[in-house]
Image (tube, rainbow, N blue to C red):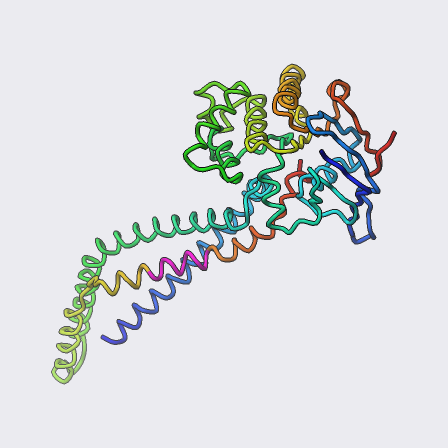
């Protein structure tokens, strides 16, 4: 379960301090597929950074399965990102020099899986998200946007994370491919009982998730 | 002879410094170009140590390939090049002797120079190999230390900020 309590993030700039998030509180149950909507600059990406332990909040709590991740040491936050969090980015962000299979195997390496088991697990994951064996050996540049996002999803769920954080997962895809990716994420949230939190502009997608939170000027709007 | 040896040593030191600077600049450029990739690796759970190890390995590979090519060329070219330089020096000293006034007085001095020049040879000993390997490692370490510091400072949050 994900519990966020009074989360605040303030950035200090030359012209003074700017509040990106202000007393944000929400709860997402395990296995729930939630979406966050909001305009550009509403604090969506900052919120995802905090949840993914990529940045430290100014104040407030983020509890994942009872552990406050804001209070973890830098090393423990890295381990948390490797094992408890899966990221799906709008621009896929696969490592360009590695094949689809190697991209997934890299995440498994960070998750601590023994070398011998990585290849079979990565192949299984890529097959599950719909990549053919020959496509699994291709570098990202030789895959379509939809295929790259499938690899990105396989990488995100590789270590059975508690939460998958998706930043505009369909933002770079055509509507038909976007729908397939959404269906894939929805299916995973059910079959793997993984909590998924997706930031999106697409109201069609947001409307189909279990719950939608709206961020406005760094606050949760009702 | 000693001055030739010290000139060669100065050349080696100069080449080492130049090599380290080239590797350093190349690695800084690589790290800057791959900033996003480093951010992604950190975001998915890669530690600073792992990313640094990857880049130090790349610097070492770059330096070792350069050293092997350089050493092979050095072994192949040093002999003929020394002979060519020696024969050029001999012919120029002979020209000077033919033109110089009072040749009888300085004939003995030119003969000595000729003997010295013809005794210049190039050789590769295990010690020279050891020094070359030491220089290679020094170049790789210096060349990747600063980029490693840059890597440690890249925040994984940049991946989301630049989305």
| Dominant secondary structure, magenta | helix
Q: Position of residue A11 (x, y in %)?
A: 77, 49
Residue B91 is left or right of residue A3, and the answer is left
Quick check: B100 above or below A165? below
* Residue sitting nearer the eye, A178 or A34: A34
* Residue sitting nearer the eye, B63 or A73: A73
Residue B41 is drawn in which quadrant? top right
Q: In which quadrant is the C terminus of chain A drawn?
A: top right
Q: Residue furthest bottom?
A: B105
Quick check: A20 above or below B80? above
Q: Residue furthest front?
A: A66
Query: Does the segment drawn in magenta span residue A158?
Result: no
Quick check: B18 above or below A20? below
Q: Position of residue B104 (x, y in %)?
A: 11, 83
Q: Position of residue B6 (x, y in %)?
A: 30, 73
* Residue sitting nearer the eye, A153 or B80: A153
Residue B143 is left or right of residue B1, and the answer is right
The residue segment tinted magenta is: B134-143
Q: Residue at x 62, y 19 (%)?
A: A184
How many numbered badges does the structure rendering display? 0
Residue A22 is drawn in which quadrant? top right
Quick check: A19 above or below A200? below
Q: Position of residue A3 (x, y in %)?
A: 76, 37
Q: Residue at x 52, y 53 (%)?
A: B147
Q: In which quadrant is the N terminus of chain A drawn?
A: top right
Q: Residue furthest right?
A: A222
């Amino acid at each position: 379960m994900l519990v966020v309590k009074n989360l605040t993030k303030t950035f200090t700039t030359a012209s003074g301090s700017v509040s990106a998030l202000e007393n944000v509180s929400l709860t997402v149950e395990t296995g729930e597929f939630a979406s966050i909507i909001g305009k550009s600059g509403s604090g969506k990406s900052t919120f995802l950074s905090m949840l993914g332990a990529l940045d430290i909040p100014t104040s407030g709590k983020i509890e994942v399965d009872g552990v406050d991740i804001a209070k973890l040491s830098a090393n423990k936050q890295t381990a948390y990102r490797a094992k408890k969090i899966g990221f799906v980015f709008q621009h896929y962000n696969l490592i360009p020099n590695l094949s689809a299979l190697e991209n997934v195997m890299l995440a498994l390496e960070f998750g601590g899986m023994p070398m011998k088991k990585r290849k079979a697990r990565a192949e299984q994951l890529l097959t599950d998200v719909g990549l053919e064996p020959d496509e699994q050996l291709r570098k990202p540049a030789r895959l379509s946007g939809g295929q790259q996002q499938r690899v990105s999803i396989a990488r995100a769920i590789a270590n059975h994370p508690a939460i998958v954080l998706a930043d505009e997962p369909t933002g770079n895809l055509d509507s038909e491919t976007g729908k397939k990716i959404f269906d894939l994420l929805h299916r995973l949230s059910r079959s793997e009982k993984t909590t998924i939190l997706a930031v999106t502009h697409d109201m069609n997608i947001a409307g189909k998730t279990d719950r939608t939170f709206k961020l406005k000027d760094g606050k949760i709007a009702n | 002879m000693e001055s030739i040896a010290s000139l060669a040593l100065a050349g080696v030191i100069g080449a080492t410094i130049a090599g380290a600077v080239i590797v350093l600049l190349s690695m800084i450029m690589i790290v800057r170009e791959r900033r996003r990739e480093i951010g992604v690796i950190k975001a998915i759970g890669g530690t600073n140590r792992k990313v640094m190890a990857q880049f130090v390995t790349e610097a070492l590979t770059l330096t070792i390939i350069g050293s092997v090519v350089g050493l092979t060329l050095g072994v192949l070219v040093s002999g003929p090049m020394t002979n060519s330089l020696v024969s050029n020096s001999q012919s120029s000293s002979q020209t000077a002797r033919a033109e110089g006034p009072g040749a009888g007085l300085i004939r003995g001095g030119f003969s000595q120079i000729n003997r010295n020049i013809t005794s210049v040879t190039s050789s590769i000993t295990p010690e020279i190999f050891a020094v070359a390997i030491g220089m290679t490692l020094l170049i790789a370490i210096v060349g990747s230390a600063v980029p490693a510091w840059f890597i440690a400072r890249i925040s994984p949050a940049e991946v989301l900020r630049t989305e």
